[in-house]
């Protein structure tokens, strides 16, 4: 097994010197999958080619409704997601990118002025800092100073994930959101896979076992998180696949909120939520997770945790949530909305 310092040095070596572009990767683990939503595709067209060519990621972890927010991008690399967030938060918002690799940061920094001109901003609203995602204080990130933390296929590369999540929830404001894409595993990754430098750099060796991730968040007081999307990673390179063995890997996009009133299972208090259709990026519906698609104007029965995620976060102004926790009706039926029969109030239910 590699020690912590050696793991960090090898990751820095791969992403700073060995990988010259995303074409150098041997697996799809650290490559964006699926198509971007239309509003993000419009922004991508404004991003410089050098930034895109040296982008390594496994999703599109930029949530909606971030105008005016403070966004922190962990492992920002050349800044693709940071610049996209910069455009979305607007002149009233701010984006901070953190990365430990000088070569990646050099690319991001030299494009700031040009990207601000393309976005039509008079002043830069993005700042790139060298630092470690395990020690955000060292990069000058204060307690409860961030609205949204994003990360794209980077946390798996950290040898100290507990410190990463502890720091994330330290810097998030109450009700703040962690929204990230990363590589997960269906079982604990064996030591020989974890100790393989190439597999680690390809975002496989450090993949989190899904249940260990759940336990890690619970230890930090986050009792519920949501899967937004998930897909299995295929290893097309025969040699890489042979070395990875029987481990099943998944690219997943996750959201979690800094809410201390969540319960460890979905409980029914009779809450009803209605999406107002006021998020400009998605006026007709809003997807919270893989079991919650809110149709604008349509009431939906939700569990207490989901109600909190909608009314105690920045999404509150976009939803009408009725009900409280004075009466408990038992565990919430967590079947997908399509499997539920509407009750006499016309509200279908869903939960993860």
Image (cartoon, grey):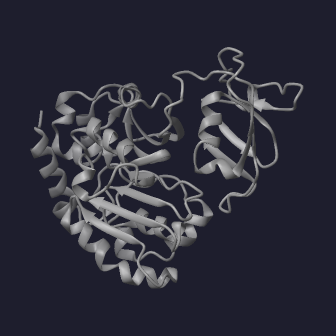
The residue lying at 59 percent from left, 59 percent from top is 37
Horizontal and vertical percent position of residue 163 = 26, 39
Q: Nearer the viewer, residue 240 or 138?
A: 138
The residue sitting at the top extreme is 330
**Residue 130 vertical position relative to residue 113 in the rendered view, above or below:** above
Would you place residue 333 above or below residue 296 in this image? above
In-front residue for pair 123/84: 123
Residue 48 image position (x, y, % from top left) = 40, 77
* Rendered image quadrant of residue 239: top left
**311 shown above or below 104:** above
Numbered label tally: 0
Q: Quadrant of residue 128?
A: bottom left
Rendered view: 54 above or below 144: below
Quarter of the image with the N terminus is top left
- Say whether residue 143 is visible: yes
Residue lying at the far right of the rendered structure: 344
**Which residue appears at 58% of the width and 46% of the height?**
313
Q: In this view, does 329 lie to the left or right of 236?
A: right
Residue in view at x 54 percent, y 24 percent: 263
Q: Position of residue 112 (x, y in %)?
A: 36, 78
Which residue sits at x=45%, y=60%?
70
Q: In which quarter of the image is the C terminus?
A: top right
Please state the horizontal and vertical placement of residue 8, each as a whole percent of the image. Answer: 16, 48
């Amino acid at each position: 097994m590699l020690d912590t310092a050696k793991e960090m040095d090898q990751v820095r070596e791969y992403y700073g010197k060995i990988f010259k572009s995303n074409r150098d990767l041997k697996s799809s683990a650290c490559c964006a999958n699926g198509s971007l939503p239309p509003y993000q595709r419009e922004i991508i067209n404004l991003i410089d080619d050098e930034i895109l060519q040296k982008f390594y990621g496994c999703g599109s972890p930029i949530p909606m409704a971030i105008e005016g927010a403070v966004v922190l991008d962990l492992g920002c690399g050349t800044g693709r997601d940071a610049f996209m967030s910069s455009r979305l938060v607007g002149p009233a918002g701010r984006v901070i990118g953190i990365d430990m690799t000088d070569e990646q940061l050099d690319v991001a920094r030299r494009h700031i002025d040009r990207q601000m001109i393309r976005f039509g901003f008079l002043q830069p609203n993005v700042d790139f800092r060298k630092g470690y995602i395990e020690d955000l204080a060292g990069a000058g990130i204060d307690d409860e100073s961030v609205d949204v933390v994003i990360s794209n296929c980077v946390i798996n590369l950290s040898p100290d994930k507990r410190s990463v999540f502890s720091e994330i929830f330290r810097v998030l404001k109450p009700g703040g959101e962690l929204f990230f894409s990363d590589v997960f595993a269906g079982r604990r990754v064996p030591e020989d896979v974890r100790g393989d430098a190439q597999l680690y750099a390809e975002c496989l060796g450090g993949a989190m076992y899904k249940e260990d991730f759940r336990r890690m968040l619970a230890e930090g007081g986050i009792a519920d998180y949501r899967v937004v999307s998930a897909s299995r990673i295929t290893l097309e390179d025969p040699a890489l696949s042979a070395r990875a063995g029987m481990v099943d890997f998944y690219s997943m996009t996750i959201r979690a909120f800094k809410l201390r009133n969540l319960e460890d299972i979905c409980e029914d208090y009779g809450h009803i939520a209605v999406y107002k259709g006021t998020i400009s990026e998605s006026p007709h519906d809003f997807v919270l997770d893989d079991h919650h698609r809110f149709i604008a104007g349509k009431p939906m029965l939700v569990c207490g945790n989901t109600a909190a995620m909608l009314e105690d976060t920045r999404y509150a102004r976009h939803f009408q949530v009725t009900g409280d926790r004075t009466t408990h009706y038992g565990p919430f039926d967590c079947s997908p909305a399509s499997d539920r029969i509407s009750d006499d109030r016309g509200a279908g239910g869903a939960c993860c």
